[in-house]
Image (cartoon, rainbow, N blue to C red):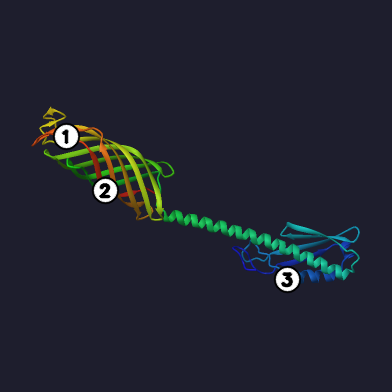
Amino acid sequence: MASTGLAWAAPARVVVEIDALAERAVDARSARRLIALELSDVVVPSPSVGRRAELFLRVLGREGDSLRLELWERGEFHGARALSRAGENPQLFARRVALAAAELGRRLARKREAALQREARLKLAREQRERQLREQTQEGPVALRSELGFAFVPGRLWLGGSKAATELTLRGALRLDLAAEAWAGHLRAAGGAALYGLSLGPAYRAVLAPRVDWDVAARASALSLQAPAASQLDSVAGQQGTWSALAAISSRLELRLSRQVRASLGVEGGALLRSVSYRGESGQERLRGPWLSGALGLVVTPP
């Protein structure tokens, strides 16, 4: 039998005690010799590294030429057998006692081996979980995301800018994202424009592979539009700023760079919830329609 985990795979030391009443039914000398012989090839794993198991066999006499055979190891009881002489001579009875002792020893060996194998499986499972945790990117409770990207409202507005977000874990992979954004670009027929926003929304991150995550999020944003070159905003002459709102859904692939850092590549689609009228070089215009954007970023989870 091979060693398992902490087992010390060597034949056990055997001590045999035969009381005076038992010696009337069994040949004590033959019993000791045969018990040692039968147990010589029974390997009982020991939970202590470098120590052999020590078995203690007690042969106790009972009335009527019957015996009780008990197996102990280091003060712990490990089973018993009752034997009746049934008219056998003491030498033959000693042989049956030795066979019964060997069976008790094998039972203990199987029990100990099963316990050590179970302990080894639990240890392996713990090591696998620890390794998976080391390989996976650290999650929450707070992460910081920074992105650079572009955005446009087709045919109306073209922007480049950045976003900064705080990711707050709610439960498991579900979280709440709070973000701020700043864009600069070109508004059709009005020239230079800037867009600033604050957003809030739920998000969910799923693990696709040990180093790759998929992130999906929804957000609602309040926007501030600045268009200095427009002669009117919202039908107010000389006004340079106004507000709008945005609802959008984004999807990102995130690549693990280290346990605390991910690189992200994402796209977003949505729509402006409030249109903005303005007067440009060619007359009255209106900013409205779908919103599309893409971004590259880093997500950092503080240790």
Q: Earlier in the sequence, mark 1 or mark 3?
A: 3
Q: For the residues marked 1 and 3, what is the alpha-carbon distance in whole angstroms?
A: 96 Å
Along the polypeptide, which appears first: circle 1 or circle 2?
1
Q: CA distance from mark 1 to mark 2?
A: 26 Å
Q: Is residue 105 above or below residue 141?
A: below
Q: CA distance from mark 2 to mark 3?
A: 73 Å
Question: What is the secondary structure assignment of the residue under circle 3?
Answer: loop
Q: Quadrant of the N terminus?
A: bottom right
Q: Dot 2: what SS? A: strand
Instruction: Identify the residue position indicated by label 2 in the image.
Output: 295
Check residue 286 in the rendering and tell me which mark sits there, or answer none: 1
Query: In the image, what residue type sits under mark 3?
Result: Ser
Farthest left residue in view? 281
Q: Amino acid at mark 1?
A: Arg
Closer to us: 92 or 33: 92
Residue 56 image offset from top left, x and y in percent: 75, 63
**Pointer 2 and pointer 3: residues touching (CB < 8 Å)?**
no
**Marks 1 and 3: which is nearer the front?**
1
Q: Nearer the viewer, mark 2 or mark 3?
A: 2
The mark nearer the N terminus, 2 or 3, is 3
